[in-house]
Structures are given as structure tokens and as C-alpha cells.
């Protein structure tokens, strides 16, 4: 909204001409509210659709929660199967699915990518010489179904009471 001076509410607050507690929260990064400084409308997000890469394991029969919207970008175009693994919240038959996670880290001079399939509680590791190569190998493994999936260890772990 503009007042008689031609300034919008947000511009007036940003310039110090007016003071608004909601705009102040936005300037400090505490919160953002519609019509005030810091508010951004979300655009260009779309729900991922299933393609041919993700196949439902036979042993999975749990309920899933949530989903992720995926932006259209160069990463999505280059790594379709990986983005699908990380973002799709429904199986091709329409049943719910918990999206997977990926963790990229460096270890002893090589790059490792850990893919965690939250829906069937299993993990797979990919090792490469660079982060890009690790992503490419994970993409190829997901497309071909050739990753070495293993049962995920239970969270929390058990520690030994007596250590020598």
C-alpha cells in the first residue's frame, strides 16, 4: 500500500521513515509476515511425479508422511533419479512414501555419498574422487537399481557398559 508520498509500507520502514514492529522482525530475520519486510511469496514449486526410476520394495508396507516440492533447476535435470529418491512422497501405485535422504561427506581423501531409504530402512554408500562423481555414480546406481543396499542400524545405538 502506498501513502501520499509514493512510498510503500515496506520501503518506508526500510528507509526509516516509518516504524513497524512486524517489519522490524523481518529485518532482524526473526519472522516474516505478509505485507511486511522480509516476506517472499513462494513461486515455481511443483510436486514431483513418479517416473521409472523408483520402484517400491516388496517388504515395505508402512505409512509415510510429508512430501517435498522440487524446483526446476539444472540439478533436477542432471540428477532425475536422485531428485526423485529425495523428494517423491508417493509410490507409483499411489500409496504414501517417506522420501529418502542423502549425506555427502569427505573421508580419507575420497568423497562419500550415503543414501538413506527412510521408507524401507536401508542405506547405500557411493564412493568417488569428487562430489560430482559421487552424485553421478548415485544417479547411475539408482537408475540401474545396482546400489548395494544394506539394513540400517537402529538409531540411538547400544554402548558397551564396560570398556577395557
Image (spheres, rainbow, N blue to C red):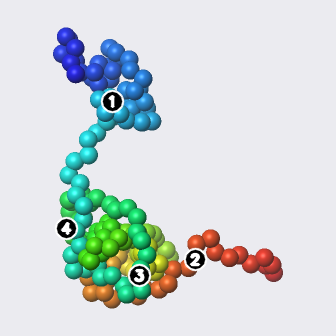
Q: Between label 1 and label 2, give the one nearer the viewer.
A: 2
- Residue beneath disc 3: 60
Numbered badge on residue 37:
1
**Marks 4/2: CA distance?**
34 Å
Numbered badge on residue 57:
none
**Which residue is pictured at 23% across the width and 54% down the height?**
45
Helix, strand, or loop for circle 4?
Answer: helix
Helix, strand, or loop for circle 3?
Answer: loop
- Residue beneath disc 2: 154
Quadrant position of the N terminus in the picture: top left
- Residue beneath disc 4: 77
Q: Earlier in the sequence, mark 4 or mark 3?
A: 3
**Marks 4/3: CA distance?**
28 Å
Is residue 134 among what the camera can see? yes
Q: Earlier in the sequence, mark 1 or mark 2?
A: 1
Mark 1 near mark 3, Cβ–Cβ under 8 Å?
Answer: no
Amino acid at each position: 500500500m502506498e501513502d501520499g508520498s509514493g512510498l510503500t509500507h515496506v520501503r518506508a520502514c526500510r528507509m526509516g521513515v516509518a516504524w513497524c514492529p512486524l517489519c522490524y522482525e523481518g529485518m532482524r530475520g526473526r519472522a516474516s509476515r505478509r505485507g511486511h519486510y522480509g516476506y517472499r511469496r513462494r513461486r515455481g514449486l511443483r510436486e514431483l511425479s513418479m517416473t521409472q526410476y523408483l520402484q517400491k520394495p516388496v517388504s515395505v508396507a508402512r505409512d509415510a508422511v510429508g512430501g517435498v516440492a522440487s524446483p526446476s533447476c539444472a540439478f533436477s535435470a542432471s540428477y532425475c533419479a536422485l531428485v526423485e529418491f529425495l523428494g517423491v512422497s508417493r509410490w507409483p501405485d499411489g500409496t504414501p512414501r517417506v522420501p529418502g535422504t542423502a549425506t555427502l561427506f569427505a573421508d580419507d581423501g575420497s568423497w562419500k555419498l550415503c543414501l538413506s531409504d527412510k521408507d524401507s530402512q536401508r542405506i547405500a554408500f557411493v564412493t568417488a574422487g569428487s562430489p560430482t562423481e559421487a552424485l553421478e555414480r548415485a544417479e547411475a546406481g539408482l537408475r540401474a537399481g545396482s546400489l548395494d543396499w544394506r539394513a540400517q542400524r537402529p538409531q540411538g545405538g547400544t554402548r558397551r557398559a564396560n570398556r577395557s
